[in-house]
Image: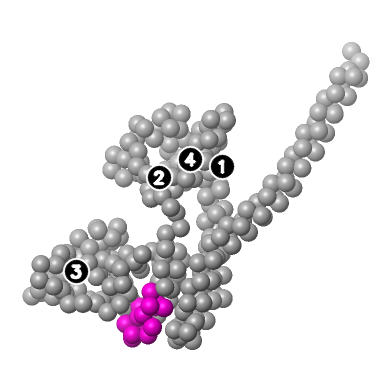
Amino acid sequence: MLHSVSIGAYPEAMVGEDLWTIDELAQKAGTTVRKVRVYHDRGVLRPPHRKGRVGLYGPEHLHRLQLVLRMLRRGYPLAVIRELVEAAEAQRDIGSVLGLEEALTAPYMSEGPRRYTAAAFRELLGREDVAVARAVETGIAAVDGGEIVVANPRLLDVALELLEEGFSSRAMVDITAEIKDAMNDLARRCVAFVNDNLIADFVEAGMPAADAERVAGIIQRMRPRAEAAADAALAEAMERYSDAVFTETASRLASQASRRRNPPAS
C-alpha cells in the first residue's frame, strides 16, 4: 500500500527529517537527475524545499517520484499522471483517488528481483558464456556491478526447467526471450486498451469521485482477465500448431516407411 503522502498535499519539511540533494533523490529512486527535472517541468513533482540556494528533497518527494516511475513503467503518459496528482491536490475524494492510485501502481509480480554472482548465474546456464551474454542482451538478466540481476525470477525458474529436460542453454534463452517480447507487446496493448477506453474518458470527465471506485475496480480485474485471455489463446494456438507438427511428422514417418518397403533398385 502506498503512503498517502505520495499523492496528497506535500507537508513542509520537518526538523530532523531526512533531506537529500537532487542527485541523492534520483539515486534512491533508481532514476536520473535529468528525468527528475523533467518531472518538475511537467508538474508531477513538487519543487524542493529550499535551504538558502540549495534545493533539498524529503520522503514525500521520494514517494511521489516512485509513484510516477511505477505509472510510467505501466505505460501511463505523464499527462494522465499529472491529472491524477492535480485531482488529489484539489482535495477531490482523496480516499477514492488513493484507491485508483493503488489499482494503477500495485505490483504485478509477487517476487522482487533476484541477484546472483556472475559465477553462480553462469553455472545456472550450464556454464555457457554465449547463453549468459544472450540473457543479458535480451533483458532476461542485467549486469549490476559484479552481480547479475534477474527482474523476473519466476520466468527464469520456468526457463531453467527446460535445461532439466535436456534443451541447450542457448535454445532455452532464445525461446524465453521470444516469450518475453511477445508478452511485452501484449501487455502494452492491454494497458493502451484500458487507457484509451477507460482512464482517458475518466480523466476527461474531471475524475469524478463517484466513478473512481468503479474505475479502480475495473483496472484491478484487468490482470486476471488478461492472464485468462492469454492462457486461452495460447492453448488454442498450441493445439493448432501441435496438430500441424504431428501431421508433418506422421507424413515424414510414412515416407520413410515407404522407402524401406520399396528400396530403390540398385
Looking at the picture, tell me which residue is in the foreground, 85 or 45: 85
- The residue where tag 1 is placed is 175
> Is disc 1 surrounded by few (<14), some (14 to 19) or many (20+) residues within 10 Å?
few
Q: Amino acid at mark 2?
A: Val
Q: Is the Cβ of the residue at disc 3 closer than 8 Å to that at disc 1?
A: no
Q: Amino acid at mark 4?
A: Asp
The answer to whether 46 is drawn above or below residue 74 in the figure is below
The answer to whether 10 is drawn above or below residue 169 in the figure is below
**In the image, which residues are magenta?**
84-98
Mark-to-mark CA distance, 3 and 1: 44 Å
Q: Nearer the viewer, mark 3 or mark 4?
A: 4
- The residue where tag 3 is placed is 57
Question: Which sits earlier in the primary sequence, circle 3 or circle 1?
Answer: 3
Q: Position of residue 56 (x, y in %)?
A: 16, 69
- Residue 85 lies in the magenta-colored region: yes
Q: Amino acid at mark 3?
A: Tyr
Mark-to-mark CA distance, 3 and 4: 39 Å
Q: Position of residue 240 (x, y in %)?
A: 74, 47
- The residue where tag 4 is placed is 157
Question: Which sits earlier in the primary sequence, circle 2 or circle 3?
Answer: 3
